[in-house]
Image (cartoon, helix red, strand yellow):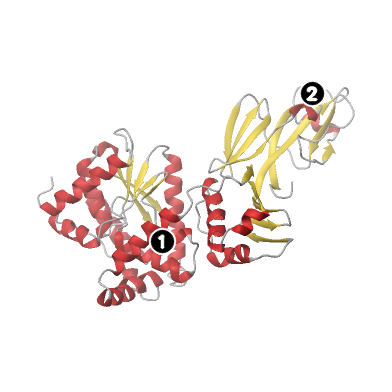
Amino acid sequence: MPSTASTKRLTAHLKSQFQFHNLLPEQLVFVGYSGGRDSSVLLALTSLVWDKNRVVAFHVDHGLRPAEERHAERALVVEQCQRWGVVLKTFDAPASPVVTAGLEARARKIRYGAFGNLLEEYPGAILLLAHHAQDQAETILMRLLKGRSWQGLAGMPVSRPGYLRPFLSLPPKDLAVVAQDLELVWWTDSTNADLTLRRNLLRNKVLPLLEATFPRAVLALTEFGATWSQLLPESPHPLWKTVGSRSEVPIGHWESWTPVRREAELLALLARAGNTSAVARRSLEPLVRENKSPWSASVGNFRFTRSSTSVVWEMVAKVKAPQYFIRVTGGQPADVGEFTVSWSLLSSNLSHRVEGIDVTKDVFWSTEGSMAAKCTGMSRFHRDHALYLLQDGAVKAAFNREGLLFWKETDEGRLNGQVFFVTLKRRSTYER
């Protein structure tokens, strides 16, 4: 158990974070464990304050460093997990050539992709990350210099669904003292000294230079991020009218907002939809400063449209939409719900592929596309990171991975026929 005042304080801080963020005793706690000093401290203290049967270290091998170094790091990780009596779960990305260009972005994509898959595999679990106050200061400064979104200037959140950063308010020296007290052994990534990587340059050169002149530089940056996050709107203005992935506000209200407020409103719409990925400030700036009507532009998976009466912000990403196969007693089926659909007459040899039908009595149609497996009963399934609810073979509703409804069946009767199975095809939510 903790033996020094510093370790006792940090242990008490970790417990208070667990209580404040309402972790439940039965929750499975994963610790993002790189083998480095900070994550080693987090793993050790978590194993002391949480049921070890519910603590799992999660180590990601990005496959971006020489094999000898990666294998040595993994050996140390295994050894330390055995020391603290916790289970180790690993993810190994395919090995890639060691190329510095784009290394940071590739590593982050691999790491957070692995984190996301882990939390999908273990619903209700929490993943702890060992970021501290200096990491937060680096993030804020990096985003400011790169011209990221106003929302991004708030820095990393202490918590978001599935994630918790219990050390985010603490200086790294607090973790260093505890690492020595617990006699931890850790691995130092060779890429940490590579000054061609921008975060390393900030950490090893820029921030020390700033702190030499401004001793409160790190504290000032983190305080700015915390203050800025409180100034951003937590939710879009009530004047936004949202249906599915489409939001609209009267042009008069849009024009009454400053460019900064306009950007904050768009980002609040993204946050409400569960899309927390950062949007480049340089991409949003023309949207919030443009005063010409009519005018439209696309930003990532979204389209911004300004008219003489309103501003519209909507998702235009390609998503999976339902494809119907139905049978009718002659004639041609009507459109599906409120959407216009192209129908194709199926050939008579359909009887050889679908049991229990009589091609002499019924006429079979499908929306454009190929056949797939039959769907029956009330069910739900995931495909391409989306959730589909079905009843008797008909898709009733479709949700993206953030839980946002992007399609629903509004008038099943207009099919004028019996659905015998449904597949999914690619269709734009903006074009339909």
- Quick one: which residue is furthest to the left in this view? 3
Specify the label residue 63 is tagged with.
Answer: 1
* Percent position of residue 378, x then y: 61, 25
* Front-most of residues 277 and 233: 233
Element type where label 2 sits in the image: loop
Q: Mark 1 and 2 residues: CB-CB less than 8 Å, in contact?
A: no
Mark 1–mark 2 distance (CA, rounded to whole Å): 53 Å
Place of residue 192 in the rendered image (x, y in percent of width and height, measured from the top left): 32, 69
Quarter in which the N terminus is drawn: top left
Q: Quadrant of residue 35?
A: bottom left
Residue 394, how many percent across, how many down?
A: 69, 30
Residue type at mark 1: give it: Gly
- Answer with the quarter of the image where residue 397 lies: top right
Residue 32 as seen in the image, left or right of residue 341: left
Q: Earlier in the sequence, mark 1 or mark 2?
A: 1
Viewer-nearest residue: 81 or 248? 248
SS type, badge 1: loop
Is the residue 236 above or below the residue 306 in the image? Answer: above
Residue 179, above or below 239? below
> Could you tell whether 236 is left or right of 5 in the image?
right
Measuring 53% from the left and 65% from the top, which residue is drawn there?
281
**Residue at 82%, 41% in the rendered image:** 342
Tell whether 4 sits left or right of 117.
left
| Classed neighbour count for the residue bearing mark 1: other residues with Cα under 10 Å, few (<14), some (14–19), many (≥20) | some
What amino acid is found at the position of numbered circle 2 in the picture? Ile
Q: Relative to residue 384, is residue 201 depicted above or below?
A: below
**Residue drawn 61% across the image and 66% down it:** 289
Residue 53 coordinates in the image, percent (x, y):
26, 36
In the rendered structure, find residue 357 and report the number of the disc placed on it.
2
**Category of crowding for the residue at label 2, using alpha-carbon neighbours closer than 10 angstroms: few (below 14), some (14–19), many (at least 20):** some
